[in-house]
Image: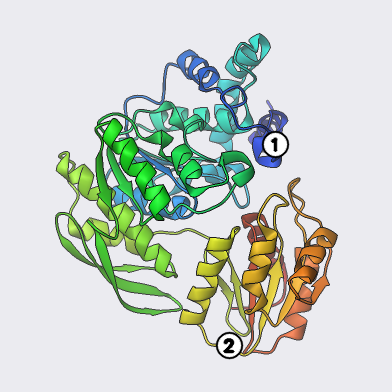
Amino acid sequence: MIPFEMQYTQATNYIESLTDYEKSSAVVYNATNYDLRRVEILLSALGNPHRGRRTIHIAGTKGKGSTSAMIASILSCAGYCSGLFTSPHLYSWQERIAVNGRPVSQRDFARLVTAIKPHVQAVNKEERFGRLTTFEALVAMAFLYFREKAAVFQVLETGMGGRLDATNIVGPGICIITSISLDHTQVLGNTLAEIAGEKAGIIKHGCTVISAPQPPEADAVIKERCRLLNARLIRVGRDVTWSHISSDSQGQSFSVKGILKQYGLIIPLLGDYQMENACLAIAAIEALQQQGVSINCTEIANGLSRVKWPARLQILNRFPLLIIDGAHNVYSINRLIESIRKYFSYRKVYVIFGSSRDKDIEGMAKELCGFADNVILTSSIHPRAASTDYLEQIFAASGITVDKKQDASQSLAVALAETGKDDLILATGSLFLAADIQKAFKKSAKLI
């Protein structure tokens, strides 16, 4: 019998052999390439494992993962077996599928791939509605795993968009639209209204919709979609509000005035936007309470205080400060800089930057122009990663002098050698870079 470690390697190799749209930005975003009918056929062959659980479905540009993790943490603290599906992953495919905060094991991952493989091959052989992708296979595996674990709830983060996302096969009782900004414009549309239309595609008839504070164009689209589908709309920032109390490098405390109650809360995640995300989570939990789900204030507070979501304003080192963050568009870089200026004191700022080629690199460079004293450009091994030469051209146009290094390890080594204990090193531009820097740091001799 093949050892399960080898089975896991074979399983990941098979998953990676499927078409992976995350590795390419050249795929046309339409109902042909993202045809949900092939997902329906696969799930039907597996006994429709996506059914039978209460579903919270999350779409948006920023904050999807954090909000999803918060909701799942609260549900678990309340004693409910809860599944969580997120993307992308930082280090391993296992991270994308979790139950009660525990990622699927290598053994179970391999077993799930074994279970779906013949059905995936059957769908792909027929090619009636196109070939199943890596993401679609992972979604099916998540549903299978949640059913096996008898999960009461499943919290699903969309990949890109929402309307044509493989997770949109569900009929959720609660939909969440996190903050919408310009991202994936070459795929989802060039305006906030167009992007909001794709995100709002997860809204179903009669469901409850929780929306983050949105730009007026996006807000109008969400409101109209709710009106057409007779969906209840709860707006964070209007119906649910928050007030900051205090914060330090360990986390922040704040109060929330919800639909039902007022809460005093602590979260170990930094950034004003994380308080906004927490409000989205609380609004969703209160909606469940109104549907008869028993969750008390202590369970809500405990769930938020225990939430973990790496590579979001995450501190790896103190002297010098080393922070990683997966910000990958202009809006998120802007919010990241605001938060760093609010929470930390430092002398000079060294930015290690790497990005996917299809992002608004020029916009991010302009945001970093008045913040960074030094910029080190690097590139990850991800197929969509921009080369350092390409990045240099864009940063030079913004008037920023840069250094270039081949990979994250070299970039980090240079930054650590050149910084003093009162300086700040920020690694940002993509989640892939944040993960690479964390791996490199673990191998270094520096200690927190």
Q: Does residue 36 lie above or below 26 as drawn?
A: above
Compare residues 319 and 23 and report the one nearer the observer.
23
Compare residues 357 and 287 and report the one nearer the observer.
357
Locate residue 136 relative to residue 175 in the image: left or right. right
Residue at 25% x, 57% y is: 300
Q: Does residue 225 lie above or below 183 as drawn?
A: above
Q: Tag count in the figure?
A: 2
Residue at 43% x, 54% y is: 179
Q: Is residue 264 visible?
A: yes
Colour option used: rainbow
Element under disc 2: loop
| Residue type indicated by callout 1 | Thr
**How far across and down, in percent of the image, does residue 296 sit?**
17, 54
Disc 2 packing (10 Å; few <14; some 14–19; many ≥20): some
Element under disc 1: helix
Disc 1 packing (10 Å; few <14; some 14–19; many ≥20): few
| Residue denoted by label 2 | 346
Q: Does residue 263 lie above or below 204 as drawn?
A: below
| Residue denoted by label 1 | 9
**Quadrant of the rendered image containing residue 443:** bottom right
Residue at 59% x, 58% y is: 329
**How far across and down, in percent of the image, does residue 307 sit?**
39, 59
Residue at 58% x, 15% y is: 119
In three-dimensional space, the C-alpha distance between marks 1 and 2, rounded to whole angstroms, equals 43 Å
Q: Is residue 111 visible?
A: no
